[in-house]
Image (cartoon, rainbow, N blue to C red):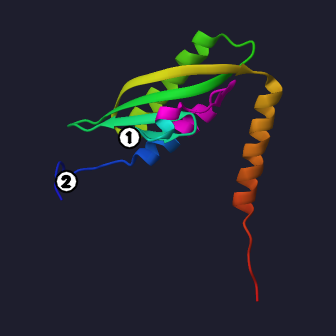
Amino acid sequence: MEKGEGTIHISEDVIVELTRKTVATIPGIILGGTSIASKLGIGKKIGDGLRITVDDGKVPAISIDTYISVQYGLRIPDVAWDVQEKIKEKLEAFTGYSVKAVNVNVQGIHFADKLEKASEKTEEAEQSVSSGSTFTD
């Protein structure tokens, strides 16, 4: 097949997961919830703390709404800038789509102990998934 024949479509679920993994690498933030309208699925793909819209075109464009909680003591504009830049950089690199907008909605602040508990739960979940169970006769 020659280059340029056919189309490539990346699932919005893949974009949500890439965005979630990118946000997880940014220290001092936790993904929050989304609004009631987005939970009803009105025109956008939602994930916990994320809403994704992909505009089809010659080069598809992605718009992202993030809902986060920022750790107490961090400068919110700096954290929001990091979120925007890292998401844009990773999605454009991995998907080849352009990122039209990354909107950061700061829903609250949290203290370090909440962040530690969240990371502990994530580690426990990853360990339980990776350990798996084997059955023998």
Query: Considering the image in quadrants, where does the N terminus appear?
Result: bottom left
Callout 1 secondary element: helix
Q: Are marks 2 and 1 in contact (CB under 8 Å)?
A: no
Residue 27 shown in magenta: yes
Q: Is residue 94 left or right of residue 1?
A: right
Sort mark 2 into few (<14), some (14-19) or many (20+) by Cα contacts within 10 Å.
few
Residue 48 position in % (x across, y down): 57, 39
Q: State the residue in front, 58 or 13.
A: 13
Look at 60% across and 17% down and name the residue there: 79
Query: From what the image shows, is residue 103 above or below residue 75?
Result: below
Residue 105 position in % (x across, y down): 54, 21
Q: State the residue in front, 10 or 38.
A: 38
Residue beneath disc 1? 95
What's the residue type where badge 2 is placed? Gly
Q: Which residues are magenta?
A: 19-37
Look at 45% across and 47% down and name the residue there: 14
Residue 54 position in % (x across, y down): 34, 37
Residue 54 shown in magenta: no
Corner quadrant of residue 77:
top right
Look at 59% across and 19% down and name the residue there: 106
Sort mark 1 into few (<14), some (14-19) or many (20+) by Cα contacts within 10 Å.
some
Residue beneath disc 2? 6
Q: Which mark is residue 103?
A: none
Query: From what the image shows, is residue 105 above or below residue 13?
Result: above
Spatial CA distance of label 2 from label 1 is 16 Å
Query: Considering the image in quadrants, where does the C terminus appear?
Result: bottom right
Residue 74 position in % (x across, y down): 70, 13
Q: Is residue 2 left or right of residue 73?
A: left
What's the residue type where badge 1 is placed? Thr
* Nearer-N-terminus badge (2/1): 2
